[in-house]
Amino acid sequence: MPRLEEVGYYLRGLWLLLTGRSEGFQYLDFSERGFWRSWWAILFCLPPTLLSWASFRIYYLEQMPEGTATEPSFFAKLAMVEATNWLIPLLVVLVMARIAGMVSAALPLIIAFNWLSIPLQWAYVPVSLIQIWSPTDGSAALLYLLTLGTYIFISYKISVAILGGQRFPAVVLVLVLFMVPLMIQSQLLTALGLVSS
């Protein structure tokens, strides 16, 4: 498991790429070893993920009859949705890279997106807290949209850096990267009975 210092090293590399400084590549490990280590990002994202599950539980219970309890299967379903949210973008990157003839960029993109998920998942913490403390507060939706917009912009900038400054492929990649998982997540939540159809 990577130490916090190592994770900070990778995040510094992403920040440098985000600000247009190519030396950021020196901070990132785009090797096969780096690929497998990047999946430890899931563990570092666990606290904000569990917090988001707590906020979703409140939303779920509000839609259900009074007295409804959340069984362990409820959280197992959320875990399934979360796993899908991690794996679908991976498949999207692989498919898009192959279609665009940029297979060599697939591994760096996946590694970068995995590590990038840590600060971006933590950025959603205020949204989850508002949803828990004040479920009817509409500011949570606005804050969510602002955070999502920032997420998309940062993902685009990182993609441009890794794709060697090619903006159009980066735009297509990021759009597909966000739209496809959102559509699949919506269908999956409905199929699992976590939201009403």
Image: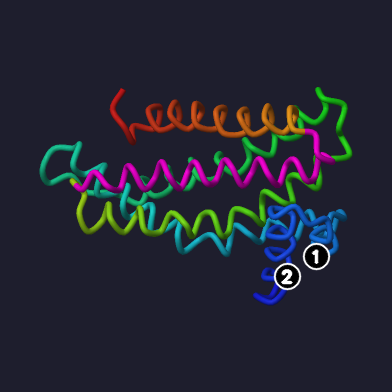
Q: Nearer the viewer, residue 168 or 82?
A: 168
Above or below — where is 57 with respect to 123?
above
Q: Quadrant of residue 15?
A: bottom right
Residue receiving disc 2: 9
Q: Which residue occupies the extreme front position in the image?
A: 20
Helix, strand or loop for disc 1: helix
Of the residues shown, which amino acid type is indicated by label 2? Tyr
Marks 2 and 1 close (CB-CB < 8 Å): yes
Q: Is residue 97 left or right of residue 184?
A: right
Measuring from the top left, give residue 169's x and y in whole percent: 75, 29
Secondary structure mostly taken by the magenta-highlighted segment of the chain: helix
Measuring from the top left, give residue 72's x and y in whole percent: 35, 51
Residue receiving disc 1: 27
The stretch in magenta equals 137-166
Check the picture and name the quadrant holding the C terminus: top left
Disc 2/disc 1 C-alpha distance (Å): 6 Å
Q: Residue at x 58, y 59 (%)?
A: 118
Q: Residue at x 18, y 46 (%)?
A: 136
Q: Quadrant of residue 192?
A: top left
